[in-house]
Amino acid sequence: MEQTGIDIGVDAFNARLKALDQQEALTLWNEAKKVPAFSPDRYSIGLILIPLVRQQQYDELNLLLAKVVKEHEKHVASDAFVAFLDILVSNSETNAAESIFHVFIDPLNKQEQGLVAAKAAHFNLILRAYRDEIRSRRGKYDAADTQAFADKAKELFGRMRESSMNGSIDS
């Protein structure tokens, strides 16, 4: 990007990012970060989520997500996080989705106190991830492994119910 002297807009960058495989996307991403004017939008972040998670670049991912929280109104950030969680869950990245939920969304997390306005959709996506994990593990792993996800789902449902009752969750 910088070497050619051509300044492409974020929409063109996103289109290019979407057309690449994960490794190429990370290479482009790292190249783009060197350009001082580079400012990814929430769609760029959605496109780079899976490559960052699969390369275990969690610090960078958390910085990007914190940027979304800081730069957008709570309801806009909340909608973006619905999309982020959906991308992760759809790509079987349950641990990453669960971690993001607990750090940025969970209204009962006393440490962060829900940086993003919690919605039922956030909870439902994590519940879907647990359901998918349970289904994929049936007959492949021991019952205790499957039961661990069932227990997580029960706990999360309880947190959702409690959050709903105390008014800290939007529908």
Image: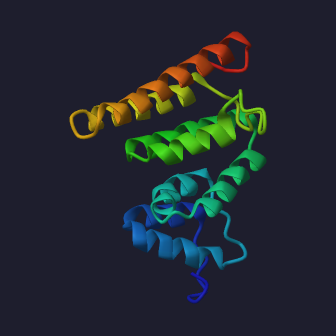
Identify the image's colour scheme: rainbow, by chain, secondary structure or one colour.
Answer: rainbow
Residue 77 in view (yes/no): no
- Left or right: where does residue 45 sit relative to residue 170? left
Q: Return the x and y of residue 22 as percentages of the image width and height.
A: 40, 66
In the rendered view, tell whether residue 86 sits above or below residue 59. above
Q: Quadrant of residue 59?
A: bottom right
Front one among 19 and 99: 99
Q: Quadrant of the C terminus?
A: top right
Which residue shows up at 58% across the image and 17% down it? 158
Q: Return the x and y of residue 117 as percentages of the image width and height.
A: 70, 30
Q: Quadrant of residue 99?
A: top right
Q: Quadrant of the N terminus?
A: bottom right
Which residue shows up at 59% across the image and 63% down it? 10
Q: Quadrant of residue 150?
A: top left
Check the image and name the residue furthest to the top.
Answer: 165
Which residue shows up at 46% across the image and 62% down it? 51
Front one among 130 and 9: 130
In the rendered view, tell whether residue 148 sits above or below residue 140. above
In the rendered view, tell whether residue 150 sits above or below residue 43. above
Check the image and name the residue furthest to the left.
Answer: 139
Q: How many marks?
A: 0
Which residue shows up at 66% across the image and 35% down it? 105
- Left or right: where does residue 80 sit relative to residue 124? right
In the rendered view, tell whether residue 88 sits above or below residue 137. below
Residue 17 in view (yes/no): yes
Q: Return the x and y of residue 46 as percentages of the image width and height.
A: 52, 52
